[in-house]
Each structure stands twice: as C-alpha cells, then as structure tokens.
C-alpha cells in the first residue's frame, strides 16, 4: 500500500459508494458487452488490456463497471482504450503507476472545458474523438497540461 495516500475515512468510503451506486457487477456488465468487441477475450482480459474500464471496490473485493462506456449495442467507445492508455501512461493521472481505477475515474467524470463543460464519460460514446483529443491535450508528453 502506498504510504503517501491520505488515510481512509468513512466519508471517503461513502463518496466512493455513491459514485458507483448504479454501476454494474462483472456478470451483468459481461452480459451487455458485445461479443465482437471482446474478440474472444474474457472480461478480465478485456479489463487488463484496457478495452473496458472498471474500478476496484475494496469493500466488496470486486470490480464495478460503468455502463456509460458502452454504446447502445454493447460496444465500448472506440476511443476508450487509447484514452485509458493516456490516463495510465507516464504523463497520466498516476505517472504510469498501476491504479485501482479511481484515479482515472476522477478525470472521466469531471466537467472538462475542452468538452464544453461536459464530462468525458458523458461524451465517450457520443463524441469519442473529442474525448480522445481532450485526453491527448491533458496527458501527452508535449502537452503543457501533462501530469494533470
């Protein structure tokens, strides 16, 4: 466990629970995920390779998945894997360190000026190219905003 993290509080645990209250467990999410998008991979493999996004919930020892990453037929946003790669990269939210998903979630749900005040999660399936460009502007080595 990282020693530079603030101590867990009841308020932070409650805030996490509220943030993912309507998210899906693995079985439910997997049932919605388009088989072609999986390309023969298990849900765990899709998660590890960045095809889909989830957060680790320590209280339940499980991952929860937001439905907003899927389009109406169960395909993940076309930009999601590259957005996640940028968020998790050297200039991303944790400087290339492994995360539990909560670090990425903060960027994904926060209103973003480059998206006219919408959160990237709201625009991911509607305007994936705009979300990808916002992530590139925030987390590329050449960006003045790198290491957001």
Image (cartoon, grey):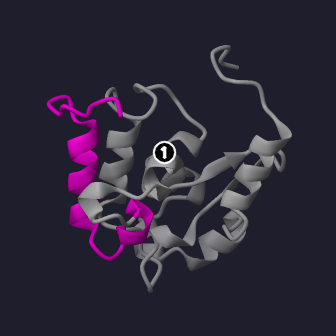
Give coordinates of residue 112: x percent, y percent. Answer: 34, 56
Residue located 51% across and 55% down the image? 53
Tell me which corner region of the image, top left, top right, bottom left or bottom right, holds residue 7.
top right
Residue located 42% across and 74% down the image? 75
So how many labels did they put on this image? Answer: 1
* Residue 49 showing in the rendered view: yes
Is 136 inside the magenta-drawn segment? yes
Residue located 14% across and 30% down the image? 142
Give coordinates of residue 69: x percent, y percent. Answer: 46, 67
Tell me which corner region of the image, top left, top right, bottom left or bottom right, holds residue 20.
bottom right
Residue located 46% across and 29% down the image? 94
Q: Residues within 10 Å of mark 1 (few under 14, many from 20)?
A: many
Pick out the residue farthest to the top.
3
Tell me which corner region of the image, top left, top right, bottom left or bottom right, holds residue 8.
top right
Which of the image's four quarters has the C terminus? top left
Is 123 inside the magenta-drawn segment? yes
* Residue 58 showing in the rendered view: no
Which residue occupies the foreground of this view, 127 or 39? 127
Which residue occupies the foreground of this view, 62 or 138? 138
Reading the image, the residue beneath label 1 is 104
Q: Which element carries disc 1, helix, strand or loop?
A: helix
Please give the range of residues in magenta.
119-148
Give coordinates of residue 82: x percent, y percent. Answer: 30, 50
Give coordinates of residue 74: x percent, y percent. Answer: 47, 79
Pick out the residue farthest to the bottom.
72
Pick out the residue farthest to the left.
142
User: Taking 135 as reference, is 93 above or below it?
Assistant: above
Which of the image's four quarters has the N terminus? top right
Side of 28 where 34 appears, left or right = left
């Amino acid at each position: 466990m990282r020693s530079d993290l603030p101590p867990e509080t009841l308020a932070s645990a409650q805030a996490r629970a509220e943030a993912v209250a309507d998210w899906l467990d693995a079985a439910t999410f997997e049932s919605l995920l388009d088989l072609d998008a999986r390309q023969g991979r298990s849900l765990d493999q899709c998660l590890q390779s960045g095809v889909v996004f989830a957060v680790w919930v320590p209280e339940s020892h499980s991952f929860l998945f937001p439905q907003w990453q899927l389009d109406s037929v169960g395909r993940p946003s076309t930009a999601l894997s590259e957005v996640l790669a940028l968020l998790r990269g050297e200039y991303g939210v944790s400087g290339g360190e492994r995360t539990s998903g909560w670090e990425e979630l903060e960027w994904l749900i926060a209103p973003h000026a480059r998206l006219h005040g919408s959160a990237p999660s709201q625009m991911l399936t509607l305007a994936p190219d705009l979300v990808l460009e916002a992530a590139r502007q925030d987390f590329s080595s050449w960006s003045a905003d790198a290491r957001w």
